[in-house]
Image (cartoon, rainbow, N blue to C red):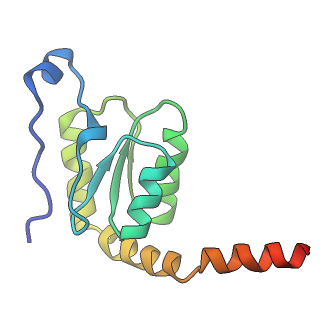
Amino acid sequence: MRFWSMPTYSSRTAAMGKSNFSSIHFAVDRPRLIHSAIRGFQHAVANGVPIVQAGIGEDKPEIGMRAEWSGLGVYLRASPPAPLMVHDAVRRIIEGPYPERALELKKEAAGFGTLDIVEREVLALI
């Protein structure tokens, strides 16, 4: 199965020397390249999708380190990362344990019953 191919960038983006990673999305059965905050991470966990996190501003380093620590993905410590860095990271995702781990995390997260926990805690306060 082919998981990923290098995205093509617009001539405007290429001329600026930047890649707009926030606009690159993949189907849920493929690695996802994100340049986002916690919502992108949560979306990846909820859908069982491994990620390549890029960026060094705001909370991106923390999200990237969470992805690496949890086994969900690879963090590129560059902004913007070079295309070869992205290519190598995606190859690591495809060839490594990341897809299986992403599915494990999805199953674990689905079992939390978040609303039930909130309801129980609120009722305990009454």
Q: Tell whether 15 sits left or right of 112.
A: left
Q: Tell whether 85 sits left or right of 106.
A: left
Q: Position of residue 7 (x, y in %)?
A: 12, 43
**Number of marks in the image?**
0
Residue sitting at x 24%, y 24%: 18
The answer to whether residue 6 is above or below residue 15 is below
The quarter of the rendered structure image containing the C terminus is bottom right
Q: Tell whether 78 sits left or right of 25.
A: right
Q: Quadrant of residue 35?
A: top left
Q: Quadrant of residue 16?
A: top left
The answer to whether residue 102 is above or below residue 36 is below
Residue sitting at x 87%, y 78%: 124
Q: Quadrant of residue 100?
A: bottom left
- For this orientation, the residue located farthest to the front is 126
Q: Position of residue 111 (x, y in %)?
A: 54, 83
Residue sitting at x 39%, y 61%: 44
Residue sitting at x 10%, y 28%: 10
